[in-house]
Amino acid sequence: NAGVMQNPRHLVRRRGQEARLRCSPMKGHSHVYWYRQLPEEGLKFMVYLQKENIIDESGMPKERFSAEFPKEGPSILRIQQVVRGDSAAYFCASSTAGRSGDEQFFGPGTRLTVL
Amino acid sequence: GIQVEQSPPDLILQEGANSTLRCNFSDSVNNLQWFHQNPWGQLINLFYIPSGTKQNGRLSATTVATERYSLLYISSSQTTDSGVYFCARGSSASKIIFGSGTRLSIRP
C-alpha cells in the first residue's frame, strides 16, 4: 500500500513563473490537506479538499494560490507568478475521512526554490 | 486561537542518552500526533495518540488529555534520531496545528 506521493520532490522556478505541485493520497483516502513549511519553521495549514470540493481554504494566501482535487487524478497546488517568499517545503497529507480526530499521513514534500 | 507549545526548542545529547520532549496544548484534543522530520526534510509519522501510552521500539509517547500535554520519550538515542520532532493536534475544522518543534542533535 503506497503512501502519500508528491511530485516533483524539488522544483526550481524563476520569479514570475508558475509552480504546479502534485499530490496523490494514500489508497483508500479521499481527503487531502496541503501544508507549507517556511525555512526553520513548523508546518502551517493551507487548504483541505475532498474530491471536486474545497472544504477549508482558510490558510491559503488570497492571491496567486489555488488548489484542486479533481474526480480523476492527483490534487494540484498551483502558485502563479511566484515570488522569492514562496520558497518553502510544501507537504500534502491524506486521511480516510475528514473528521477532526482522524490521523493524517504525510507525503515527502515538494521543495520549491524561487530564484 | 489554538496553541501548541513544545519544549525544549533545542536539545543536544550524547549517543546512548535518554530524552523527554514535551508538548502542551491549549484546548482538549481528539487528535494528537508526533512526527520526526529527518535532516533530509522527510516527515515521518511516529505516533497517533489522542490519549494513553504507546510504544514503538525505543520510542514511546504518553498523552494526558485532561491535563493537556503529551510527552515523547526517546531511549538509548542514536545519531539517526537527530532531526526536528513536531507534535500536532487536530482542530474542530479537520486541519491539524503544529507546534514549533524540538530540534534534537545526537552526538556520536
Image: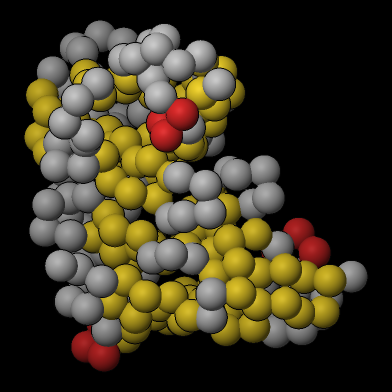
Q: Quadrant of residue A106?
A: top left
Q: Image height check: is B74 above or below B33? A: below
Tell which of B50 and A47 is nearer to you.
A47
Residue at image point 27% right, 84% down? B68
Q: Quadrant of residue A61?
A: top left
**x%, y% of residue A15?**
45, 16
**x%, y% of residue B97?**
29, 58
Instruction: State the quadrant of the C terminus of chain B.
Output: bottom right
Residue at image point 84% right, 71% down? B107
**x%, y% of residue B12?**
72, 77
Q: Quadrant of residue A47?
A: top left
Residue at image point 49% right, 58% down? B35
Q: How many marks?
A: 0
Residue lying furthest right:
B108
Residue B54 shown left or right of residue A36 in the figure: right
Residue A76: in sight, yes or no? no
**x%, y% of residue B24?**
34, 80
Residue A100: in sight, yes or no? yes
Q: How is the image coloured?
A: secondary structure
Q: Image height check: is B8 above or below B97? A: below
Q: Image height check: is A76 above or below A62? A: above
